[in-house]
């Protein structure tokens, strides 16, 4: 029996990702894999000789893609010679570099990521994280001359900081250096205008909102999640609502689905015509929050799922998610092990794709009101959370039994808050008297969401912290989820046959 071409491509990508995953955790050399491959061939020869003969080329190709994944991960770590920035760690260095990311403001400092680094007119590979005082006036694309001792990131309170930074090719850090601005960033075009709009929006929100509404709205609309006070972050964590604060796959998927539902259910547009307006809104939103890598990959996966819904072929959505993940890992294989955001985004979108239709069937008795698609919200949220829950338990140990209810209460208001927030900003940039029309309803909604999350965080018996959740149990939970998916698929096939 010959395997269809579409399935071959799917299996090639799965084994490419599997090769990256296994080499990420086991770190074995390529030659170790060969005996296992020949062992598999021998087993197939005696167990399924005809299948092996008919598909020997495909099996070899799949194995080569697995090796490609192993090799791609192993070459992602640079050789630390004089041509690479990490070579100069533990030395005081004078260099020139360009700010390649939007500066990230924290509680007491600002983080800059520098690339295009030159030391004594020599181009050096790699990037650097530079921490400067709060309220420092540096922007993306600024060319800076810096003098400081370089350090290698280390372990901070059991957190492997060097691995965390290495996922984006950062192997050196520099704290509070001497800086001279050689050239201000040259911004032009639509992206520059959006970044200007973002900065002005932040100033406007800071001017008229107080904490915690200020920090929450800035995180939701503009991506400034690191400025949220730790206490409020803990409330969102205990209720399973951290995805609202971060631009994740779950966030973009729910956001795009709600936009599509609004366009079809309220504005009565045909389903085939809502994809491009949804895509434009999502792209604008990603640029507005500063084009972080997490938002870009979330948008790719979320829009891939929306495209599949547009053409009415949900199976295509699953393949698009797989293709997107494989392409992103091809460019940066460290994401699979070192980037929790990538893992959660990928699993959340998969959960929505696989489980949202099943939950829609389970919740048939729950109404889908025209302006409040309760069943859709609940199905989408639960689908994502089932897939990410084992990983959240493993990394953070947070288990919230009240999370589905809080999600349903909060997610209905998130698009409304975002819409009112954008209207407040747009009219506020024209004249603040116009913005005041939206200020009070926006403040009330923000306060309602924050209080709902706070109350949910402190209801006894619904929130637990599990220390040292074992990896073995995490794997078992995912096997159970896969078993459940297979069972659902068999039931659907039986219903179709009837």
Image: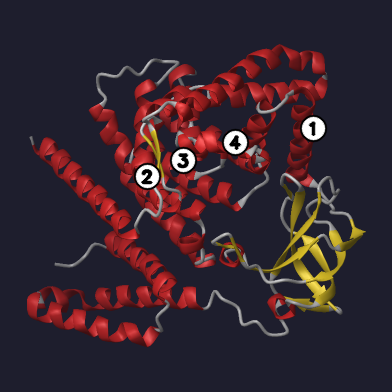
Q: Do labels 3 and 2 touch, CB within 8 Å?
A: no
Residue 387, relative to residue 65: is it above or below? Answer: above
Residue 389: numbered disc: 2
| Closer to viewer: mark 3 or mark 4 | 4
Residue 476: image location, x then y, percent:
26, 55
Element at label 1: helix
Q: Residue at x 32, y 82 (%)?
A: 33
Mark 4–mark 1 distance (CA, rounded to whole Å):
23 Å
Q: Which residue is mark 4?
A: 231
Q: For numbered disc 4, what is the local secondary structure?
A: helix
In the rendering, at what x and y percent does residue 166 appear?
60, 67
CA–CA distance in space, label 4 to label 2: 22 Å
> Which residue in the protein does label 3 denote?
250
Label 2 element class: helix
Residue wearing tag 1: 203
Place of residue 194 in the rendered image (x, y in percent of width and height, measured from the top left): 73, 39
**Residue 80, image x and y in percent?**
65, 82
Q: Residues within 10 Å of mark 2 (few under 14, many from 20)?
A: many
> Can you say which quadrant of the picture contains the C terminus?
top left
Q: Is residue 63 visible?
A: yes
Which residue is depicted at the point 80% across and 25% down? Answer: 429
The nearer-to-camera label among 4 and 2 is: 4
């Amino acid at each position: 029996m010959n395997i269809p071409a579409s399935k071959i491509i799917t299996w090639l990508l799965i084994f490419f990702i599997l090769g990256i995953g296994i080499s990420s955790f086991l770190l074995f050399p390529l030659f170790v894999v060969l005996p296992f491959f020949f062992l598999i061939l021998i087993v197939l020869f005696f167990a399924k000789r005809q299948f092996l003969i008919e598909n020997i080329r495909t099996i070899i190709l799949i194995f080569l893609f697995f090796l490609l994944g192993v090799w791609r991960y192993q070459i992602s770590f640079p050789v630390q010679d004089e041509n690479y920035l990490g070579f100069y760690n533990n030395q005081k260095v004078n260099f020139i570099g360009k700010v390649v990311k939007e500066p990230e403001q924290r509680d007491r400092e600002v983080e800059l990521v520098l690339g295009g680094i030159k030391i004594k007119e020599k181009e050096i590979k790699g990037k650097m994280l530079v921490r400067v005082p709060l309220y420092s006036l540096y922007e993306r694309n600024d060319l800076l001359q810096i003098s400081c001792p370089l350090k290698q990131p280390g372990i901070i309170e059991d957190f492997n900081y060097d691995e965390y930074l290495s996922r984006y090719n950062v192997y050196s850090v520099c704290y509070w250096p001497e800086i001279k601005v050689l050239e201000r960033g040259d911004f032009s075009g639509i992206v520059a205008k959006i970044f200007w709009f973002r900065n002005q929006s932040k100033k406007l929100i800071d001017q008229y909102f107080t904490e915690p509404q200020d920090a929450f709205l800035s995180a939701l609309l503009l991506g400034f999640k690191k400025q949220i006070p730790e206490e409020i972050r803990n409330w969102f964590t205990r209720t399973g609502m951290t995805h609202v604060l971060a631009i994740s796959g779950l966030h973009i998927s729910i956001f795009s689905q709600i936009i599509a539902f609004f366009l079809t259910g309220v504005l009565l547009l045909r389903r085939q015509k809502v994809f491009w307006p949804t895509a434009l809104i999502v792209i604008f939103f990603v640029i507005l929050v500063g084009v972080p890598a997490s938002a870009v990959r979330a948008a790719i996966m979320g829009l891939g799922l929306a495209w599949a819904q547009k053409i009415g072929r949900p199976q295509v959505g699953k393949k698009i998610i797989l293709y997107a993940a494989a392409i992103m890992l091809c460019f940066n294989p460290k994401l699979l092990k070192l980037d929790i955001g990538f893992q959660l985004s990928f699993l959340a979108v998969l959960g929505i794709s696989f489980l949202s239709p099943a939950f829609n069937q389970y919740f048939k008795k729950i109404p889908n009101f025209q302006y409040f698609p309760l069943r859709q919200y609940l199905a989408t949220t639960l689908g994502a959370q089932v897939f990410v829950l084992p990983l959240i338990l493993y990394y953070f140990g947070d288990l919230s039994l009240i999370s589905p209810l809080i999600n349903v209460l909060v997610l209905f208001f998130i698009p409304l808050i975002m819409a009112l927030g954008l209207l407040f900003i747009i009219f506020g940039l024209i004249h603040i008297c116009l913005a005041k029309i939206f200020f009070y309803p926006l403040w009330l909604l923000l306060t309602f969401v924050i209080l709902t999350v706070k109350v949910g965080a402190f209801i006894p018996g619904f929130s637990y912290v599990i220390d040292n959740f074992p990896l073995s149990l995490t794997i078992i939970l995912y096997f159970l989820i896969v078993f459940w998916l297979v069972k659902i698929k068999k039931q659907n096939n039986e219903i179709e046959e009837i």
